[in-house]
Image (cartoon, grey):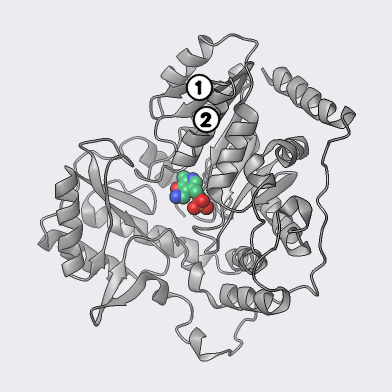
Amino acid sequence: STELWEAWLASSLGQLRSAGLLRTLRPVLPTLSAIQVLVPGDVLAPWIEDGGGHACQEVTQHGGALRLFSTNDYLGLSTHLALRRAAADAAMLYGVGPRSSAVVGGYTLLHQELERRLAALKGTEECLVFPTGFAANLAVVSALGSGEDAAIFSDELNHASIVDGARLASRNKGQLHIYRHNDMQHLEELIRACPSHHRKLVVADSLFSMDGDFADFEGLVRLRRKYGFLLAVDEAHATLVCGSRGGGAAEAFGVADEVDVHIGTLSKALGAHGGFVACRADLKTLLLNKGRPYIFSTATPTPVVAAAIAALQVNEQEPDRREHLWRLVRHLGEGLGVDACSPIVPLIVGSEAAAVAASAALLEKGFYVPAIRPPTVAPGTSRLRISLSAAHTIEDVDALLVALKECGILPATGSHAGSCQRAEQDVVF
Ligand code: PMP
């Protein structure tokens, strides 16, 4: 129950304190001045002339334009003027490399500012910015799930970084239970079979990266209330994509304050690079002391941090980007005749060879839609993974639909029943 977690946290932090080892602060290196990240209407160097939108979804190959339906740049921010400007300014002011780990001088006022803004977005007390999203998941699951009194419950389709964190924790005596994808009955059975004195951690992707469906938030929250486990969700694909403020799927489903640990990445919709964990102050302190991927890795580069701050500002100032993205999702879903519940739309084709051939046929027509094969997905479910970005236009999607038809690529019927209906209602604008 929750008391087990409280007692464990208090005792873990207490032990460190009495040994004189508790780290509560990181040295904050001053930055020269606050960076002017948004300059609306400003005219800059020629490289910004494409307006920072469409270009990121197009590359030139063999003299022809190739339309990308493969990126995680969901809002098209990676080439946004504000982000380029922020990163360039920060690089000129502070240099590129952060020079050391965040706990020994790689942490600056800009990192602090980004953490403050991310905590505000997620509605949590605190936030910790990690070098990557992979490191964030690894740190959370290995730090919280280790010890013989710990039990981790992980969705079978969780991201590799959660899987690896769980493997690390189980080497450190944590018990690992894998529940069938979104199967709340199975999760409950596993929880009930686990001794009551175990600290229980349930971890799930909020938006599953290869299927484009959502975690069963309603079920997870119901079970959390019943069993008092700690709930961690990886919002890598949902941050800035879902929720009216872009807070993520937990916000969209109205349960953000029932999630204990919000994990995310800066490398997808934020258009930058790095990861983060938003949570309560004591959990953050625990990660500062026990999160080895945080402590022993070089901090996020300052230009990247500046770009992520700019992304959060753009998110507030240009909400139409998210609205446009969801319009594209609906348009693609209608065109394919499927319930597309997110910007990730898989077309399951079956064998690895069929997926590779389908991707190659689309490439010939000027579209890059990657083939996803085992071990990323289960054998026999190889697929094309279409990902949409606000930098696409309705015409881009129409052109893709024509190409898919010409290549004879059709969606499998009946995909995404159930959870999508809720997404349609609650997540889409
Ligand atoms: N979680 C999920 C669900 C992801 O898809 C990814 C990236 N593929 C990560 C975490 C890792 O994030 P990053 O790329 O920032 O390391």
Residue drawn at 55 percent across, 38 percent down? 233
Classify 133 as above or below 361: above
Disc 2 residue type (three-letter): Ala
Disc 1 residue type (three-letter): Leu
**Whole-percent x and y of residue 99?**
70, 63
Residue drawn at 74 percent across, 35 percent down? 286
Residue drawn at 38 percent across, 29 percent down? 181
Q: Is residue 201 left or right of residue 52?
A: right
**Whole-percent x and y of residue 212?**
37, 45
Q: Is residue 292 left or right of residue 70?
A: right
Residue 419 seen in render: yes
Q: Give neighbour class at mark 2: few <14, some 14-19, many 20+ (Cα, 10 Å).
A: many
In whole angstroms, how far apart are the C-alphas of marks 2 and 1? 7 Å
Q: Is residue 27 left or right of residue 188?
A: right
Per the image, the residue denoted by label 1 is 176
Nearest to N terminus: mark 2 or mark 1: 2
**Quadrant hosting residue 37:** bottom right
Residue drawn at 28 percent across, 41 percent down? 374
Per the image, the residue denoted by label 2 is 166
**Quadrant hosting residue 314:** bottom right
Q: Secondary structure at mark 2?
A: helix
- Where, quadrant-wise, is the N terminus in this rendering? top right
Q: Is mark 1 within 8 Å of ligand 1?
A: no
Whether the residues at callouts 2 and 1 have beta carbons within 8 Å, the answer is: yes
Q: Secondary structure at mark 1?
A: strand
Residue 242 seen in render: no
Q: Nearer the viewer, residue 102 or 209?
A: 102
Classify 164 as above or below 101: above
Picture disc at residue 68: none
**Quadrant hosting residue 150:** top right
Q: Is mark 2 within 8 Å of ligand 1?
A: no
**Whole-percent x and y of residue 167?**
50, 29
